[in-house]
């Protein structure tokens, strides 16, 4: 596997990441994603509501990273932050990105009671009160907080349309364009009830630094909208689909929820 970069193909996909310089993929104690069994999740009355304060003017760019579509934000100050939930202090929004399948029956990374969704949105935040930079936070057990939102194919989602319209010029790996004045709040469901557990990044380097906040309610995405995501490419003539990691062993981790 030397010389081969990680990805989602048969030779460089999740089953091979432990052979490609990321042994934590198999040896880790808190790898993500996982399957969440709602009846086994513990209600915790001490879990606070999520508090989102996002400045639309902090959005900067949208790009095809070669493994996903990603929107980056200015995180040099507390312009877009997440507080509350199980978190201590402010976590700055760094970026959000998507995972999706080749068909509507799979594509999400987390699974709820055996149910897969067509896709999953991840909003990645880092603990800027405790750590001086994103790189330091990635290596810390409480460095990151990621909100996961399930995407369900149903009605077209107006909030996603600005992103979908940008995909036309992002077909190729490393393509990038300006993406201004966008609030991620528009992508979230009206109900912010959530499950939370300690996990990891779901892509290499798979650092075990993430406090996960998996929203209970999905948001919709239109069939025509997700079709645009499936027209993107990992590389030349290599459709960008099934860019998700399967559930990992939970290893007796506690999963909590803020609702009964």
Image (cartoon, grey):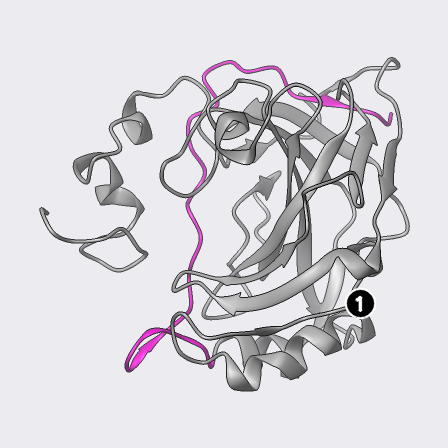
Does residue 116 appear to the left or right of 156 in the view shown?
left
Furthest residue in direction left, as rendered = 2
Picture layout, residue 233 above or below residue 8:
below
Picture layout, residue 160 above or below residue 218:
below
As for residue 259 lying within the magenta part, the answer is: yes
Picture layout, residue 63 above or below residue 124:
below
At horizontal 80% and vertical 70% (from top left) the residue drawn is 159
At horizontal 84% and vertical 53% (from top left) the residue drawn is 55
Does residue 174 appear to the left or right of 236 in the view shown?
right
Q: Residues within 10 Å of mark 1 (few under 14, many from 20)?
A: few
Instruction: Where is residue 174? Give x, y as percent.
Output: 40, 70
Picture layout, residue 245 above or below residue 182:
above
Front in this rendered view, residue 41 or 29? 29
Magenta span of residues: 231-260
Instruction: Where is residue 70? Give x, y as percent.
Output: 56, 60
Asked which secondary structure carries label 1, the reply is: loop
Q: Which residue is mark 1?
A: 181
Does residue 69 appear to the left or right of 93 in the view shown?
left
Instruction: Where is residue 169? Give x, y as percent.
Output: 52, 85
Residue 156 shows up from this direction: yes
Occupied quadrant, residue 195: top right
């Amino acid at each position: 596997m030397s010389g081969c970069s990680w990805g989602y193909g048969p030779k460089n996909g999740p089953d091979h990441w432990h052979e490609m310089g990321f042994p934590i993929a198999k040896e880790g104690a808190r790898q993500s994603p996982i399957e969440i069994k709602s009846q086994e999740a513990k209600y915790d009355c001490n879990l606070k509501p999520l508090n989102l304060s996002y400045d639309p003017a902090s959005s900067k760019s949208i790009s095809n990273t070669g493994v996903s579509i990603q929107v980056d934000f200015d995180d040099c100050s507390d312009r877009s932050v997440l507080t509350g939930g199980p978190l201590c202090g402010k976590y700055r929004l760094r970026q959000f990105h998507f995972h999706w399948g080749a068909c509507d029956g799979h594509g999400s990374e987390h699974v709820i009671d055996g149910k897969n969704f067509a896709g999953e949105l991840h909003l990645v935040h880092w603990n800027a009160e405790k750590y001086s930079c994103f790189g330091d936070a990635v290596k810390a057990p409480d460095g990151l907080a990621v909100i996961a939102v399930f995407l369900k194919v149903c009605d077209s989602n107006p909030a996603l349309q600005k992103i979908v319209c940008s995909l036309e010029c992002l077909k190729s790996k490393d393509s990038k364009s300006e993406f201004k004045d966008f609030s991620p709040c528009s992508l979230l469901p009206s109900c912010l009830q959530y499950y939370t557990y300690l996990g990891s990044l779901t892509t290499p380097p798979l650092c075990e630094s993430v406090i996960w906040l998996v929203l209970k309610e999905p948001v919709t995405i239109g069939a025509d909208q997700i079709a645009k995501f499936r027209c993107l490419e990992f590389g030349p003539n290599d459709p960008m689909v099934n860019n998700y990691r399967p559930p990992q062993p939970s290893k007796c981790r506690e999963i909590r929820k803020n609702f009964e």
